Each structure stands twice: as C-alpha cells, then as structure tokens.
Image (tube, helix red, strand yellow):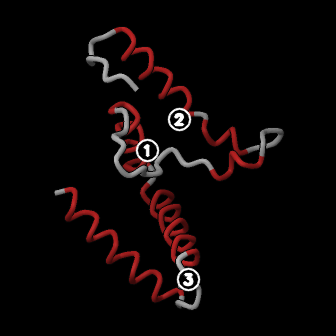
Amino acid sequence: MFNWPEKNERYQKIAKFVDALFSKIDEFAKPPRHPKWKEASISAVVPGWQRFRPAQDWIDRWHERHPDAANQASLSSFKDFMVRQGHANLSQEELEKLYVQFLEWNRRLKN
C-alpha cells in the first residue's frame, strides 16, 4: 500500500474502510459466507510488513476493550502453532506457561 500522508483524503478514506471492515469482520465468519473466513485474522503478523497505522490502532483499541477475549484468542492461536510445530504432547499447564513466557518476551521486544 502506498504510504499516504495522514491528512491526505485517500489516507482518510482507507482509514474509514478499515474501521468499517474490522468492525464487521466477525460477520464474515458466519453462514452463508465461505468457511475460510473463519481462518481470517486481522491481527496476524506478516514478517517484514508494516500494518497501516489506523488498522493497528483499531486492533489495539479492541484488545484494550476485550482483554480476556483477546488473550484467549491469542492463547488458542499459540496452541495451534505449537501443535503444528510438533509439540502436541505438551500439557495444558506447559502450554500456558510457555505462552506467558512468550508474552513477556514479546513485550520486551516492543519496549
């Protein structure tokens, strides 16, 4: 995406689109939409890509308002990741301990 200046009309239009789409993203996972929408994640991280600032702001606000849901979704994603990496034999307690360590490590990276 082109890096439009914040005051630019196109930037503002894209920001409005992001807000409208993200606010309704859960609706896309419901029938009659394609089942693949259930796999969509607006907060997925793509290495080397920088998220559009209004999109990141929207995600951050959502996480602030829904900390339990956000943490549960992240923990669920983390569990899926660990299973795909061949660590399916870890107990729930071990997974949660690793997840907490991961969150602490991730927080340190951002600071």
Of the 4 image quadrants, the one containing the C terminus is bottom left
Does residue 62 sit above or below 22 in this rendering?
below
Label 1 sits on what residue type? Trp
Badge 1 or badge 2: first in the primary sequence? 2
Rendered residue at 49%/70% (across/down): 78
Label 3 sits on what residue type? Gly
**In this image, 38 relative to 41: left or right?**
right
Q: Name the residue tied to disc 3.
A: 86
**The residue positioned farthest toward the right in the image shown:** 32
Rendered residue at 27%/71% (across/down): 104
User: Horizontal and vertical percent for residue 100?
Assistant: 35, 76
User: Dividing the picture into quarters, in which one does residue 6 lie?
Assistant: top left
Taking depth in this image into account, of 46 and 8 the one nearest to the observer is 46
**Disc marking residue 31:** none
User: Dividing the picture into quarters, in which one does residue 8 lie?
Assistant: top left
Label 2 sits on what residue type? Phe
Mark 3 vs 1: CB contact within 8 A: no
Rendered residue at 53%/65% (across/down): 77
Give the structural element (helix, strand or loop) at label 2.
Answer: helix
Taking depth in this image into account, of 105 and 1 the one nearest to the observer is 1
**Disc marking residue 62:** 1
Q: Residues within 10 Å of mark 3 (few under 14, many from 20)?
A: few
Does residue 106 sit above or below 13 in this rendering?
below
Give the structural element (helix, strand or loop) at label 3.
Answer: loop
Q: Residues within 10 Å of mark 1 (few under 14, many from 20)?
A: some
Q: Name the residue tied to disc 2.
A: 22
User: Horizontal and vertical percent for residue 63?
Assistant: 41, 50
**Pair 3/2: label in front:** 3
Could you tell me how far apart the alpha carbons at marks 1 and 2 are, in whole angstroms? 10 Å
Does residue 109 sit above or below 95 in this rendering?
above
**The residue positioned farthest toward the left in the image shown:** 111
Badge 3 or badge 2: first in the primary sequence? 2
